[in-house]
Image (cartoon, helix red, strand yellow):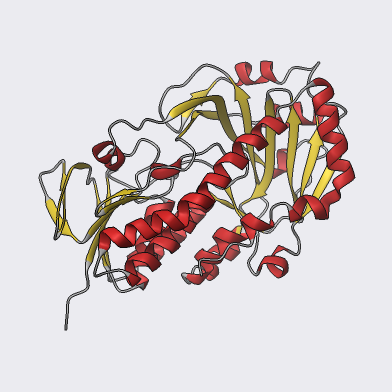
Amino acid sequence: MTAAPTIVVAGAGIGGMTASLTLAGRGFRIILLERADRLEEAGAGLQLSPNASRVLIGLGLESRLAPNAIAPDAVSVMTVRTGDEVGRIPLADAAVRYGAPYWVIRRADLQAALIGKVAETPAIELRLGAEVTDVTQNAGGVTVTCASGSQDSAAALIGADGVWSAVRQRLFPEIHPQFTGRIAWRGIVDASRAPAGFDPHNVQLWLGANAHLVTYPMADGQRINVVAITTGTWHAQGWSEPGDAAELAAQFAVTHWPAAARAMIGAVSDWRKWALFALRDGGVWHKERVALLGDAAHAMVPFVAQGAGMAIEDAAVLAGCLADGQSDIPAALTRYENLRAPRVTRVQRTAHQTGGIYHLAGPMALARDTAMRMLGGQRLLARQDWIYGWRAD
């Protein structure tokens, strides 16, 4: 019997673990390298739209995820201009409309489900404390060297190691993430301390001048995830720097933001922040037998909540391309790029445009609010069909 081809995956985040599982399901042997000595939660909550939840359910994760996920009834869009709701995008029937649910979930719960599935998959070998330092290729394969001096030979290497990807740096040293001028702040509020007006069944999106605020329930409704996006010049690398509550509160001043939004911000006792960096539209995908996935390939601004979703989609498509093209790995990775780049480009551009719309001020904000009211929830949702209705086949 011919031995299963080996694929090395660098990075045991959401994209890397999903890729490992999809590739293992296609008959590959996986060496999953993670530079951290232990896997820890990065971030608080995230949104999994149907295009992403469909892939995870297909991997057999529904029983692990569903008990810890919440399917919101709607996205309630609020305008800072008046403090009123200008749109309600219905999500309660997402599972019927798209064939998969729209979930909000703690990132830690998603990570735990993926880790558990990886541990149960004999074809995947997870190595912690394994930092990739060198990559060499030849006609027959790729050799991956770690800081410890260990080396692995494989048919291909997948770089799923995030926006500051070491694999991408080895392949494309001229490509660098660019600061977007925006900063994300995240915090958690116990549901028992939720300010008046918080709806535990919905995602709430507040739109204001040069800033917006997103809140939604998670962890079986016991906690609330709070994310604020502001403009600024601070742009240190990293995902979880301490945030100054007074600095954030000043950007949501009384004269600009309604009391309900300010009360939610004030309820957070511990803020973490990170500067938002992005890669060029269209991303950067592969060279010969090495491919990139998720933020390593196409880090984007989070204004359509598709960062995790695009990585999960990448994993599903990549596994199919490699399974169908084992005899010519470079050609299979070219096909992967050709399938993914147009869609990711459209998502990246939509995210950029959406951020601009969210942060409008003055007469332009009034025009936005009027247009959203006139469109109504169903037509606003229909604008997302091309994202949410995606299927790997």
- Nearest the viewer among 391 and 126 is 391
Q: Residue at x 63, y 62 (%)?
A: 389
The answer to whether 209 is drawn above or below residue 239 in the figure is above
Q: Hey, which quadrant is residue 269 in on the image? A: top right
- Number of numbered tags placed on the structure image: 0
- Nearest the viewer among 156 and 166 is 156
Q: Hey, which quadrant is residue 324 in on the image? A: bottom left
Image position of 202 (left or right of 36): right
Q: Can residue 64 be seen in this view?
A: no
Q: Which residue is drawn at 52% across and 30% down?
A: 272
Q: Can residue 342 be seen in this view?
A: yes
Residue 61 at x, y = what percent?
Answer: 49, 68
The answer to whether 57 is drawn above or below residue 229 in the figure is below
- Nearest the viewer among 273 and 363 is 363
Residue 382 at x, y = what percent?
Answer: 75, 56
Q: Residue at x 43, y 62 (%)?
A: 317
Residue 313 at x, y = what percent?
Answer: 49, 58
Question: As drawn, which residue projects farthest toward the bottom?
Answer: 1
Residue 68 at x, y = what percent?
Answer: 58, 59
Image position of 232 (left or right of 97): left
Q: Which residue is drawn at 20% across and 61% down?
A: 155
The answer to whether 199 is drawn above or below residue 83 in the figure is below
The answer to whether 200 is drawn above or below residue 122 in the figure is above
Q: In which quarter of the image is the N terminus?
A: bottom left
Image position of 156 (left or right of 216): left
- Nearest the viewer among 17 and 219 is 17
